[in-house]
Image (tube, rainbow, N blue to C red):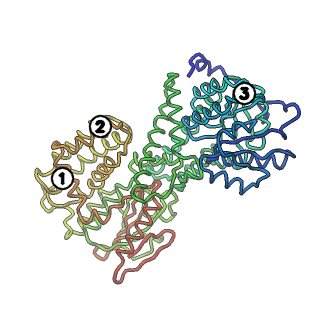
Amino acid sequence: MDTSRSSHIHHLHIHQTDSNPFSRPTTPGHHSVQIGFCGLGAMGYPMARNLAKWRKQHVPGSLPILVWNRTQTKAQDLLKELGEDAIAIADSLEQLASESDIIFTNLSNDDVVRSVYQVFAKALQEPKLTKNKIFVETSTIYPTLAAEIDTLLSNLPSAHFITSPVFGAPSAAAAAQLLVVMSGDYRSKKEVAHLLIPAVGRKVMDLGGNVEKAPTFKLVGNSLILGSIELLAEVFTLSEKAGIGASLVHQFIKEVMPAPPLVGYGEKMLHDQFDGSKGFAIDGGLKDSSHIRKLATELDSPMPALDTAHQHMLTARALHASQVRRGEAHFDVLDWSSLVAGTRVAAGLDGFDSSKVHIALEEAHVPYTAYQIDTQNKPAWYSQVNPLGKIPAITFGGPATPPDQPSPESTKLVESVAILEYLADVCPEARLLPSDPLLRARARVFVEIYRNYVHDAFREVFFLGKPIEGILTALEKLQRALPPERGFAVGEWSIADAVVAPSVVRLRLFLREGLGAYTEEDLQKLRDALASERFARIAQYVQDVSERPSFKKTWVSDWWLIREIVVPCDSRSVSCRFGGNTPGSVRARRHLRRVAKRRLSGGGMSQLTSNVLWRM
């Protein structure tokens, strides 16, 4: 970016109150103008549609808008929707450039934008232009690309170029409520502004004659939106960890700071509505955040919130890619609000606790019933089980009652370790803890090593980008606590293994799929180290626990899961509720239903309601 220009960014002041700061163009007006539109993606399609509809309804004698898209299907859909009197399809970019007077472009990334304008420039070299043409770039691009295109088109004497990025989601584009930001040639902006308002947007902001200003402003604005989404994700996650619940925080936002992005993206996070085809795709979010970080670096202006949001989007995309490879993805494309997956998993809301207790239940060989509860909208009766709303929790004793009518006579326990030790005591035949006092003590030490070293190191390395030596050192400590040859934490299986198994197997999954906030170089170092003789014992342990029947039966590959389990143990009703929540919950629920059908047998009873996932 031109530093002589960028150094004065902070001197830009805008005082505009009207929706359009430009006076209306002189006659003959817009009716004889041929408009071209290039790029019919999530934003381009509704923009072109609204522009065509407006002109058809309000500008008598206007020409059909000439459209081009890389895949012709989108152009054909638009033609079918609006008709031949509103839409015409260009056969090529060259035709679009040569036959149009004003050409709008709305494209996916900088490389595509550059290549399209290179085609435009080449197509217009011969014959020489005799009529003015205005090129309007509405994509989110890096500012220096705008200057590059301006220079490219300046060789064409009658061509003018303006940048005109827009603010708003596809829904805002569909409703013609976009905020349009313009910079470049004044006369061209004046002409285009009256085409776009109110046909496509609700307001124009004029940033002057430097074509880099509008793209810069767009990045600044997007940094505010993305930073808000990151903060929203962190606050929602904290509220879940604190037992408050994200739904209450969302209500607070609507009461105190009801900004549309906070309310809208909060709604998506609250209900795991991460369909990028109906919002802003995460790939676009990562492209924008990369531009913002590059701009911040050039201007020596740190933006740590943006750095964190970028990492969390990478985490969400990597997790989604892993789901796609397994055929378990619920959405074809993720919305950028799915970055909340990164904050949730980093905070431990990833099913670790549920796996611990679930494995112990399987080891105890007791029948149980499982329930599906939305932890972001917990039913009121759950406060009778755990007033803090946290999971896991168990109730036992008292009469057998439906889950939504917990008996006041039942006893309640919370925290996974307490639940595990309780199960070990009431189901002694399962040998969840060794009978030997020394081995029992070693089992507890093994758990403490995991909790104090491995758990925190996993989070720091894989989600916060800390040096990889942290997790390697922690795993060495855990490895030293294992028996020398084979076997589990204390030789025989115990609840210590139930605690640690989900984490170490998940670590192996992360390395296999390349998930984490580390570089490719560090990823390879981690893989090499853990495949070496140095970690042979821990590798054998991971293999052993992953082959344990109870682990196989309870392991859900799509591990963002909310669930409740009710266990009758020694004629006492024991209910265990545990969970985690991120984008894959719906797919995981379907998986559990399939598992449930396989488990139902004999006198078992199956019931599926809005709150009950499965019962046997």
Based on the displayed image, in which of its 4 quarters is residue 516 positioned? Answer: top left
Sooner in the amino-acid sequence: mark 2 or mark 1: 2
Task: Check the image and name the residue furthest to the front.
Answer: 127
- Mark 2 closeness class: few <14, some 14–19, many ≥20 residues within 10 Å: some
Three-letter amino acid code at the position of disc 1: Gln
State if disc 1 and disc 2 touch (CB < 8 Å): no
Can residue 255 be seen here? The reply is no
Judging by the rendered image, the residue that carries numbered circle 1 is 540
Q: Residues within 10 Å of mark 3 (few under 14, many from 20)?
A: few
Q: Position of residue 300 (x, y in %)?
A: 50, 22
Tell me the residue that label 2 is attached to. Answer: 468
Element type where label 2 sits in the image: loop
The secondary element bearing badge 1 is classed as helix
Q: Residues within 10 Å of mark 1 (few under 14, many from 20)?
A: some
Q: Which mark is residue 571?
A: none
Q: Which residue is mark 3?
A: 128
Residue 12 rendering spot, x and y as whole percentages: 67, 22
- Whichever of callouts 3 and 2 sits on the residue coming sooner in the sequence is 3
Residue 525 shown left or right of residue 234 in the figure: left
